[in-house]
Structures are given as structure tokens and as C-alpha cells.
């Protein structure tokens, strides 16, 4: 993280944490660290079988037994199924939600909800899951006497996002790289807007930029991301290093009341000007609400 706080054993005993995309890479490293700190970690995978497999591996290390949860974040139906599962296994509420799962697709395709898949996974799923779990987050805050936390995994590629994108189905030319940049810009702006909206309800929202990390993300995504991972792998950070910012935002007690931030290497940084533009936030909020089928805030 660039300072001594990276080594602090932040205590997480008694705190329930959901980490999406926890089977590998940054998500797994985040989940392992929070589990080691004493948290009860809900480890998400796309399928029940994969979630059970990863939990069995982690449980062998001792500590509170992780809880497997599953749901396909490529659709709103899958998001709601995951949320229902989380509410069932964490009836006392949720203290931290780490929206880590993401994806990039070499070919244009659509979610069942009519959104290009990259935007669906990296933004729509994050927005939907966070809003559906608001009650659980507020319950966690009330029970612990501390704010609950939402940590959205972002990317410096948000700076290359197109602020003028109107049609989230990409009816014209499709670029895997551009769609990913757009999704990260849109989600970062939404995170800022959500932090402002929830400023006084006991739930904080911050974004974590892990930097360039060697994971299976590029290999699984194909296209330009696979090439980048293959050629640049010797220069990329490990998942454990990439996870440090998410871990700090999830666990450091000195950040209890910090919200609306963008962090890289464990420290607050300044994101692109457009991502910080309230007028852009409003456009993103309204379009997101249309997809979610909810009234715009």
C-alpha cells in the first residue's frame, strides 16, 4: 500500500463480509485476508459447486468458517438470487460488501436485461446488488454501531471511458477495450453518486483501484486483455498486492466514516474530471434506474 498501515492486522471478528468473484485473483486474495482477520466471509462464485469448492479450501486454514454463496451476475435475476441467498445466510446483517466480480468480453453480446455484457457485469450487477442489500447493510451498521461499507473495485482505465455514451447496447461498432473502460467510468461515477445519496444512513461507498494485476481475468476475457496479460505478466502485480486497497477499505477502522473516495495503493487519489462531475452522475443514475426498473433517486 505504500505505507506501514499495509501490515496492520485490522481486526474483523464479528463482521460479515460478502466478496463477489471470490474464487480467484483479487477477489480470492481479498477474501483470504479478511478471513484471516477474523471476518465471516461470504465467498461468492457463479455456481454453488464452485463456491463450495473454494470455501472448503479456505476453511482448512481455521478461523470462522466461510459461507459459500452463488449467483450469475450476468443478469438481474442472478443478482436477486444472490441477494436472497446472502440475506438467508446473514440474517444479522452485512458489514462489508466488496463488489469485486467483473468481466470483459471479446465479442458483443447482451444480458437478458438488454445491456451489453461488459456493462451488465461491471456496473448493472454492482448497482443492483448494492441497492438490494441496502437493508442488510443498514442492519449490520445498527447492530455493530459502526457504518457498514461498500467497496467497488474500479480501474484507472475509467479515464478512457466515453462520457457521451448513450446506448448501453452498443448498436454500432463494438470494442472490448472501450466497453470495459466505459463500464468502469460509469460505475465509478455511480459510486460517487451513491456515496452522496447515502451520506447520512450509516453506509459508506468507496472505490478501489488495484492497479495492473496478474490474474486469470485477461486469459478468460480473451481479446486485447489476454494479449496484455501474456506480454506484460512479468511487470504485473500479484493478486495479493492488488487486493491491498480493497482490504484497507473493508477493514481499516480509521476509515469508518470515509465515503465517496477513490483509492489506489491504499491512499486516496483523484479520478478523472468527468467521473467527478455531478451532472454526469445524474445521467448515469437515471439510465441505471431505467435498467433496474426502479425510480431514479
Image (cartoon, rainbow, N blue to C red):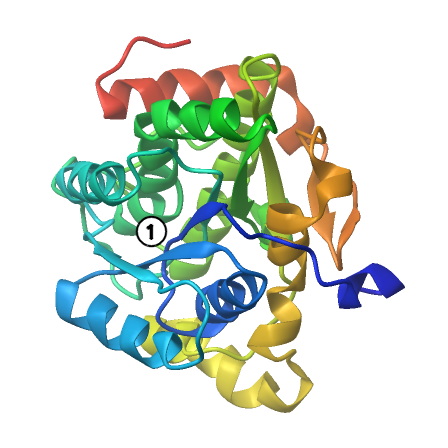
Q: Residue at x 26, y 43 (%)?
A: 86
Q: Is residue 257 left or right of residue 170?
A: right
Farthest residue, direction right? 3
Whole-percent x, y for residue 140 in the image = 45, 31
Query: Is 247 on the left-hand or right-hand side of 113?
Result: right
User: Percent x, y for residue 229?
Assistant: 51, 81
| Residue 231: % across, % down | 56, 88
Instruction: Tell me the quarter of the picture where residue 212 sits.
Output: bottom right
Read off the residue under disc 1: 118
Q: Quadrant of residue 66?
A: bottom left
Residue at 55 percent across and 68 percent down: it is: 36
Asked if residue 49 lies left or right of residue 193, the reply is left
* Number of numbered discs visible in the structure rendering: 1
Quarter of the picture containing the C terminus is: top left
Give neighbour class at mark 1: few <14, some 14-19, many 20+ (Cα, 10 Å).
many
In the displayed structure image, the side of residue 126 where residue 98 appears, left or right:
right
Relative to 119, is 133 above or below? above
- Residue nearest the viewer, comparing 33 with 292: 33
Q: Is residue 153 above or below residue 127?
A: below
Q: Which residue is at a point 46% across and 73% down the rendered structure image?
A: 25
Residue 255 placed where, x, y %?
73, 38
The picture quadrant where one finds residue 221 is bottom left
Q: Which of 277 and 73 lies nearest the eye of the viewer?
A: 73
Q: In the picture, which quadrant includes the N terminus?
A: bottom right
Q: Is residue 297 above or below residue 234?
A: above
Answer whether residue 271 is visible to the viewer in this image: no
**Residue occupying the point 71% across, 28% down:** 257
Q: Is residue 192 visible?
A: yes
Q: Secondary structure at mark 1?
A: helix
Amino acid at each position: 500500500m505504500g505505507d506501514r498501515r499495509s501490515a496492520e492486522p485490522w481486526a474483523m471478528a464479528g463482521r460479515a463480509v460478502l466478496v463477489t468473484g471470490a474464487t480467484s485473483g483479487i477477489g480470492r486474495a481479498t477474501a483470504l485476508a479478511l478471513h484471516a482477520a477474523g471476518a465471516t466471509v461470504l465467498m461468492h462464485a457463479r455456481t454453488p459447486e464452485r463456491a463450495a469448492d473454494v470455501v472448503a479450501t479456505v476453511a482448512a486454514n481455521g478461523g470462522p468458517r466461510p459461507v459459500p454463496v452463488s449467483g450469475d451476475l450476468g443478469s438481474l435475476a442472478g443478482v436477486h438470487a444472490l441477494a436472497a441467498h446472502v440475506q438467508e445466510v446473514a440474517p444479522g446483517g452485512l458489514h462489508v460488501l466488496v463488489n469485486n466480480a467483473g468481466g470483459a468480453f471479446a465479442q458483443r453480446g447482451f444480458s437478458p436485461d438488454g445491456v451489453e455484457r461488459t456493462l451488465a457485469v461491471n456496473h448493472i450487477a454492482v448497482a443492483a446488488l448494492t441497492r438490494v442489500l441496502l437493508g442488510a447493510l443498514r442492519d449490520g451498521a445498527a447492530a455493530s454501531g459502526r457504518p457498514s461499507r461498500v467497496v467497488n473495485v474500479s480501474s484507472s482505465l475509467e479515464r478512457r471511458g466515453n462520457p457521451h455514451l448513450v446506448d448501453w447496447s452498443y448498436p454500432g461498432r463494438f470494442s472490448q477495450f472501450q466497453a470495459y473502460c466505459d463500464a468502469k467510468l460509469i460505475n465509478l461515477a455511480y459510486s460517487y453518486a451513491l456515496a452522496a445519496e447515502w451520506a447520512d444512513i450509516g453506509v459508506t461507498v468507496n472505490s478501489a483501484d488495484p492497479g495492473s494485476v496478474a490474474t486469470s481475468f485477461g486469459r478468460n476475457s480473451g481479446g486485447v486483455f489476454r494479449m496484455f496479460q501474456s506480454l506484460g505478466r512479468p511487470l504485473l502485480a500479484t493478486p495479493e498486492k492488488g487486493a491491498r486497497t480493497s482490504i484497507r477499505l473493508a477493514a481499516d477502522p480509521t476509515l469508518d466514516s470515509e465515503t465517496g473516495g477513490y483509492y489506489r495503493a491504499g491512499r486516496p487519489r483523484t479520478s478523472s474530471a468527468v467521473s467527478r462531475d455531478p451532472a454526469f452522475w445524474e445521467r448515469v443514475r437515471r439510465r441505471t434506474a431505467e435498467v433496474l426498473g426502479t425510480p431514479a433517486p
